[in-house]
Amino acid sequence: MCGIAGFTRHRTQAEAAAALTDMRERLRHRGPDAQANYSDGRIALAHTRLAVVDLCGGAQPRVDADGSALTFNGEIYGYTEHAAELRQEGIPLRDNSDTEVLFQMLRRNGVEATLRRIDGMFAFAYRDPDGAVWLARDRFGEKPLFYAEHGGDLYFASELAALRAHPDLAGWPWDERSLRLFLALQYLPAPDSGIAGIKKLPPGTMLKFRDGQSRLTRYWHHPRGDSAPVASLECHVERLDDLLLQSVRDRLVADVPVGIFLSGGLDSSLVAAYAKRCDPNVHSFSIKFEDASFDESSHAEAAARHLALQHRTIPVGRDAIVAAFDGVLARLDEPMADASILPTYLLSQVTREHVTVALGGDGADELFLGYPNFVVRRYAGMMSLLPPALGAAVRKVLSALPATSGYMNWPFKFRQLSFGFGRPPEVQSLYWMSGLTATDQSRVWPGGNVDQLLASQFGVLAGENWGESDVDPVGMLSRLFLRGYLPDSVLTKVDRASMYHALEVRAPFLSKAIGEFALSLPTEFKLRHGTGKYILRRLARRYLPSDIVMRGKHGFAVPLASLFRGRLRGRIGELILEASGPIHDALHRPALEKLLRDHWQGRHDNSRQIWTLCVLAAVTRART
């Protein structure tokens, strides 16, 4: 796992070196084991390395005499098979790293053919022998890549702060439309970054840049939801069994210790079951919270006992959560307000004390329909007939109830669901998951149109050129999650929280083979009788007890509502009310004060809105 940065033409070697070093230093946490620059007048590349495979080899940037140059972040799974093929064809490899394999595949086969073949989590920049510069990102967006075009040149980096460290891009303004969308969604779908002129490369996409011109191409498309070979459910269960075993086996390959994030839920427990089959000595890790409604440690320990794992449960008190709050907001450089970044940050911190790589269960909910949204989507047509005024009335009644701080309490669920009343069925999920709703934003930041923003965003995510007009509504919602929420919220959270501690996290469910398999299945194999991840649960019965197999969805969360009334009260007041700059000068201070006051006095649970505003304040403040 690494950090990459670079740009095309530059005036002098000294200027290139200075800019590269500034950009690279913003990425040191991603690669503490080695840092290096390369520049030749036509391209400048920087790399920071977290050594995981071939600890003595794999140095980057990788450059050859024919002009080829590569800087690469991520892992290529199954790279040893590709290495054997290259050697059989007489292509020498100078070390045993996946970096060398990727470099030689790109030189031999070209970018498009290589991307079609490889499985991995990656973002890379490659200059081919003809002088074209290519950027590429993995199919699901596990690894980040930001870029900008300016003055006929291309600039790129793994994180926004590194890109903005280049003097040509310093001071570029925040984009108001993007930030309003962020307040509504709590994340920004690619290509938006929040900064005018800077973009996120979308997952499954490559960019070719030559002579000051760029061309963006999607190299991977989601299979249709009914394209799997006609077979019984049990035949597909057998196929999934093989695919998961192979994926976990591939993701255990490393020259450093590997462990497992274990929550005790279906997804992580199933990953752990396969990991145990591949490595009897594998370790697993979980954290224990004081608040019982947020704590999953007992479930993790039960799964670990059943699988005979070497397991560690690390108690986490409120002091640690406060430290995570400060640590995340001090380092976060982009609009992303998934609050589970806080426990993920803490879990990554304690896990890194023992291993360098961890396996997680991300992607299963999106691919196999594990979220409640997929069940509720079948009733969206009826909810679209309910007048929005009824939703407002529901929220008024709920607001009269005493505020509660428990995890996913029922007033919160009903409140979020009510925002979808009267909305078109296909966009209701965006409203159910909203951070600051249209009403909230009209008070806090007057002048925007949240309904228009969300309708436009649905159009972007649905995409007129995806060729999926015949996919059923639940299957289409799954694709919307895969194109927005998964890469730009879930995977962004995991990448940043783990890499702040130089920990690499791998997601077995997001292998190329499993992704294509899951997306090709008909919906009824994944969602049946109101039970999501149906085929996954059928498989899990072979390895896990029924209470884990049938356990309901429990997100990774911390008790922010009570912390915002207690230990963090002063911090959030300072962040939200004392922030300054063009964005915060436009916010309506009395509305912000009321939002905070209502929460502090226990009239409402506004923790979701408060956290989102804290992130807005933190990422848009001036940084050195």
Image (cartoon, rainbow, N blue to C red):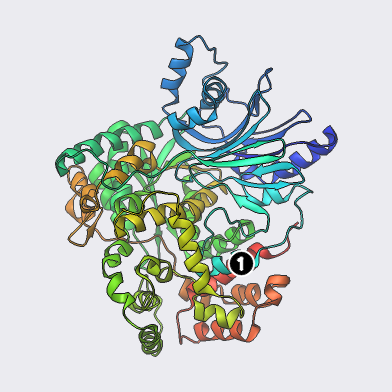
The front one of 532 and 226 is 226
- Helix or strand or loop: what does disc 1 sit on? helix
Residue at 55% from the left image edge and 65% from the top image edge: 182
* Image quadrant occupied by the N terminus: top right
Q: Is residue 557 visible?
A: yes
Residue 258: quarter of image: top left
* Image quadrant occupied by the C terminus: bottom right
According to the picture, the residue beneath numbered tag 1 turns out to be 177
- Residue 380 horizontal/vertical position (percent): 30, 70
Asked whether, in this view, residue 18 is left or right of residue 230, the answer is: right
The front one of 537 and 327 is 537
- Residue 203 horizontal/vertical position (percent): 49, 45
- Residue 235 horizontal/vertical position (percent): 16, 38
- Residue 199 horizontal/vertical position (percent): 62, 51
Placement of 375 over or under 360, stated as above or below = below
Amino acid of disc 1? Arg
Residue at 50% from the left image edge and 65% from the top image edge: 456
The front one of 563 and 16 is 16
